[in-house]
Image: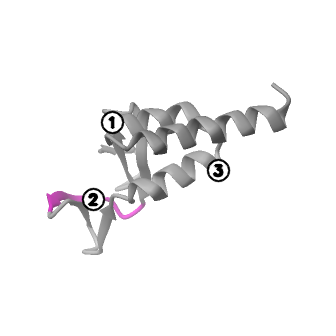
């Protein structure tokens, strides 16, 4: 969390260290009073007493977002770190191949 020089504006960035990717970034114009990690979620309490909950998306939702952005190598990394079945890994390879074929590579 870092505070900017423009009053109480704060930025929160959540990193997925295992997959080396930014999982979330957001700006809170009213500033942040506290960040709490509980019950598998991140809660952000702002200076004007609003509570924001950041919850991790399911693996299938993450994979869908990565497919939509054609980030197949990252999808493979996610599948490996989540210990997904080989059929999922094979499906990622198939989708990547289909993407490259339609793209002309």
Are the residues flagged by discs 2 and 3 in contact, CB closer than 8 Å? no
Gap between marks 2 and 3 measured at Cα = 32 Å
In this picture, residue 62 sits left or right of residue 10: right
Q: Give me the residue at 55% from left, 54% from top.
A: 64
Q: Quadrant of the N terminus?
A: top left
Main secondary structure of the magenta stretch:
strand
SS category of the residue bearing label 1: helix
**Which circle, 2 or 3, is nearer the viewer?**
3
Are the residues flagged by discs 1 and 3 in contact, CB closer than 8 Å? no
Looking at the image, tell me whether mark 2 or mark 3 is earlier in sequence order. Answer: 2
The residue that label 3 is drawn on is 68
In this picture, residue 22 sits left or right of residue 66: left
The residue that label 1 is drawn on is 81
Vertical placement of 5 versus 34: above or below?
Answer: above
Gap between marks 1 and 3 measured at Cα = 20 Å
Q: State which region is magenta.
A: 29-38
Give whichever of 3, 38 is nearer the camera: 38
Give whichever of 32, 76 is nearer the camera: 76
The residue that label 2 is drawn on is 32
Q: Give me the residue at 32% from left, 59% from top.
A: 31
The residue lying furthest to the front in this view is 87
| Crowding near the residue tagged with mark 2, few <14, some 14–19, many ≥20 C-alpha atoms within 10 Å | many
Q: Quadrant of the C terminus?
A: top right
């Amino acid at each position: 969390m870092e505070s900017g020089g423009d009053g109480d504006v704060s930025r929160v960035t959540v990193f997925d260290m295992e997959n080396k990717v930014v999982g979330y970034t957001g700006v809170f114009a009213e500033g942040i009073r506290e960040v709490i990690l509980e019950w598998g979620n991140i809660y952000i309490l702002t200076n004007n007493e609003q509570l924001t909950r950041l919850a991790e998306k399911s693996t299938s939702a993450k994979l869908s977002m990565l497919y939509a952005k054609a980030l197949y190598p990252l999808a493979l990394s996610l599948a490996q770190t989540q210990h997904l079945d080989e059929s999922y890994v094979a499906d990622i390879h198939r989708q990547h191949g289909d993407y490259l074929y339609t793209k002309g590579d």
